Image: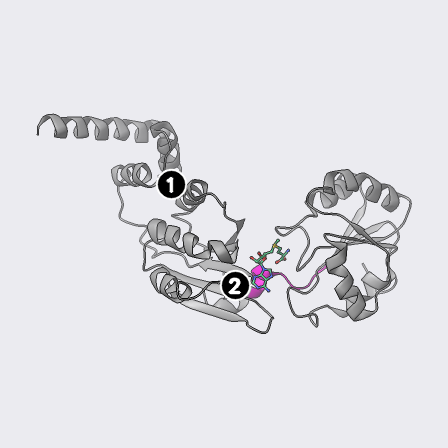
Amino acid sequence: MNSSSPAPGTLYVVATPIGNLEDLTFRALRVLKEVALVAAEDTRHSRKLFQHYGITTPLTSCHAHNEAAKVESLLARLQQGESIALISDAGTPAISDPGFVLVRQCRERGLTVSAVPGPSAVTAALSIAGLPVDRFAFEGFLSAKQGARREALQGLRNEERTLVFYEAPHRLLATLHDIVLVFGSAREIAVARELSKLHEEVFRGNAEAAIAHFGRDRVRGEIVLLVAPGEREKSQETVREALQRWRRDSDLSMKEIVKRVAREFDLPGSDVYRESLALRQDEIGGVDGG
Ligand code: SAM
C-alpha cells in the first residue's frame, strides 16, 4: 500500500491507542478519515477517539457477538470497491479482539487487507518489562476457571520463551498463586499495568514478591502479565515425578495425564503409560507393605 488515498476495496486493519490518545499514527489518522466506513468494536467507545481527532467517517459496529453476521455486509461493500477500516476498542484488532473472521474471509475472497500498525499491549509490555524478549509466546487471556487455568499453565511448564498473558485485575492474584504452584515461587515475572496511561507501572520480581506487592491493595487497571523462562537445565524432574505433579495439581484422568507428560518429555505415550503402571504398582505395594 502506498501513502496516498486509500486503495479501493481494501480492508485496513488499524491499530488505535491503548490508553494515551496521542498514540495514533499519522497514517492511522489519515486512513480513518479517508475510508468510506469504519467498523469498530464499540462505536460509542470509538466516538471519543473520533471526536478528539475530528474524524467524521461513518462508524458501524463489529464486535465479538455480531462479527460473523456482520462480515457478509462488510465483504459486500469491499467487493463493491469501498475501502473500510477495522478498529477495536484499543490496540491492534484481532489480537485478543474481534477481527480474525473478517480478515480471514477477506483473504479467502482475494480482497486486499492492509495493516496500519501501531500500539498493542503485548509489544508495549514486552518492550519495557525487562524480561528476555528475543523469543516470546503470547497466550492471550487465561481461563477464568481455576482448573482450566492451571491446566493451561501446566502445559506451558517447560516453555523456553517468555510467556505473555492478558489478565483482568480482579484475577491477577489468583493467577499469580497458580503461577507459584506451577512454576515455583522463585520464577521471575513482570506485571505491566496501565501502559501509556497516568498510572503506568511495571513490577518485576519473583512470583512470590508479586503476590506480596499486589496483595496490599485492590488491583486496578489493565494488565499484561509476563513470565520469564525457567532455568535452562530443564528441571531435573523424572517422568514419575511429572506424573505425580499432574495428579496433584489437576483433576485429569491418568490417561490424559499420560498424554501431557508424554508431550512434555517428548516421549512415546506407551513409555509414559508403562511408567504410570509402575508408579501405581509401587504405590499399591507401598500400601500393602505397610
Ligand atoms: N487488541 C488489544 C491489543 O492489541 O493489545 C488487546 C485487547 S484485549 C481485549 C484487552 C487487554 O489488553 C486488557 O484486558 C489488558 O490485559 C491488555 N491491555 C490493553 N490495554 C492495556 C494497557 N494500557 N496496559 C496494560 N494492558 C493493557
- In the displayed structure, would residue 255 be above or below residue 246? above
Q: Return the residue at label 1.
A: 264
Residue 125 seen by the camera: yes
| Dot 2 or dot 1, earlier in sequence | 2
Q: Relative to residue 139, is residue 184 drawn left or right?
A: left
Where ligand 1 lies, by image quadrant?
bottom right
Identify which amino acid the numbered label 2 is placed on: Arg
Q: Residue at x 58, y 65 (%)?
A: 124
- In the displayed structure, would residue 138 be above or below residue 277? below
Q: Where does the image place residue 42, in percent across and percent down from the top left?
A: 73, 53
- In the displayed structure, would residue 229 be above or below residue 98? below
Query: Callout 1 environment at 10 Å: few (<14), some (14 to 19), or many (20+)?
Result: some
- In the displayed structure, would residue 247 be above or below residue 202? above
Query: Callout 2 environment at 10 Å: few (<14), some (14 to 19), or many (20+)?
Result: some
> For the view shown, which residue lies furthest in the left direction?
290
Q: Which mark is residue 142?
A: none
Residue 2 seen by the camera: no
Q: How many labels sit on residues?
A: 2
Q: Where does the image place residue 145, in percent across and percent down from the top left?
A: 47, 43
Q: Is mark 2 within 8 Å of ligand 1?
A: no
Q: Where does the image place residue 204, in percent across and percent down from the top left?
A: 42, 67
Find the distance from the CA under tag 2 to the CA under tag 1. Answer: 35 Å
Q: Would you identify the image quadrant in which residue 244 lies?
A: top left
Q: Residue at x 13, y 29 (%)?
A: 287
What is the secondary structure assignment of the residue under circle 2? loop
Q: Relative to residue 182, is residue 35 drawn left or right?
A: right
Please check the rendered image and state whether residue 120 is part of the magenta-colored stretch, yes or no: yes
What is the secondary structure assignment of the residue under circle 1? helix
Q: Residue at x 65, y 50 (%)?
A: 97
Q: Return the residue at label 2.
A: 220
| Magenta stretch, residue numbers | 116-124
